[in-house]
């Protein structure tokens, strides 16, 4: 297993954790907010909107650019 495989495995584990957290949040039996609620809360002020813009730019630059 090389470093690329470990990196991909790490990202897959993060994705799986996010999906499990979202599933738990949607059951309604816990106080964990859904992803939509978190994004709505972040987007309420200017700093949050700028932060989201920077986050999307970073994701685009690192994952979608060739």
Image: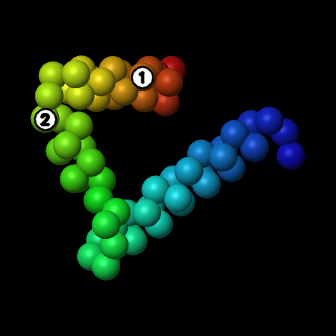
Q: Who's the residue at 22% across and 22% down the image?
A: 47
Q: Within 10 Å of the Cα at label 1, are there few (<14), some (14-19), or many (20+) other Cα atoms? A: few
In front: 62, or 27?
A: 27
Q: Which mark is residue 58?
A: 1
Total marks placed: 2
Q: Position of residue 46 (x, y in %)?
A: 15, 22
Residue 60 visible in the shown view: no
Q: Who's the residue at 74% across and 37% down the image?
A: 4
Q: CA distance from mark 2 to mark 1?
A: 21 Å
Q: Position of residue 29 (x, y in %)?
A: 31, 79
Tags 2 and 1 touching, CB below 8 Å: no
In front: 17, or 30?
A: 30
Q: Position of residue 15 (x, y in %)?
A: 51, 53
Placement of 56 over or under 20, stated as above or below: above
Q: Within 10 Å of the Cα at label 2, are there few (<14), some (14-19), or many (20+) other Cα atoms? A: few
Q: Who's the residue at 23% across and 37% down the image?
A: 42
Picture quadrant where residue 44 is located: top left
Placement of 15 over or under 63, stated as above or below: below
């Amino acid at each position: 297993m090389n470093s690329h495989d470990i990196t991909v495995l790490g990202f897959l584990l993060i994705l799986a954790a996010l999906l499990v957290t979202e599933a738990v949040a949607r059951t309604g039996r816990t106080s964990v907010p859904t992803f939509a609620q978190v994004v709505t809360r972040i987007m309420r002020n200017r700093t949050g909107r700028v932060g989201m813009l920077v986050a999307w730019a970073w994701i685009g630059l690192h994952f979608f650019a060739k």
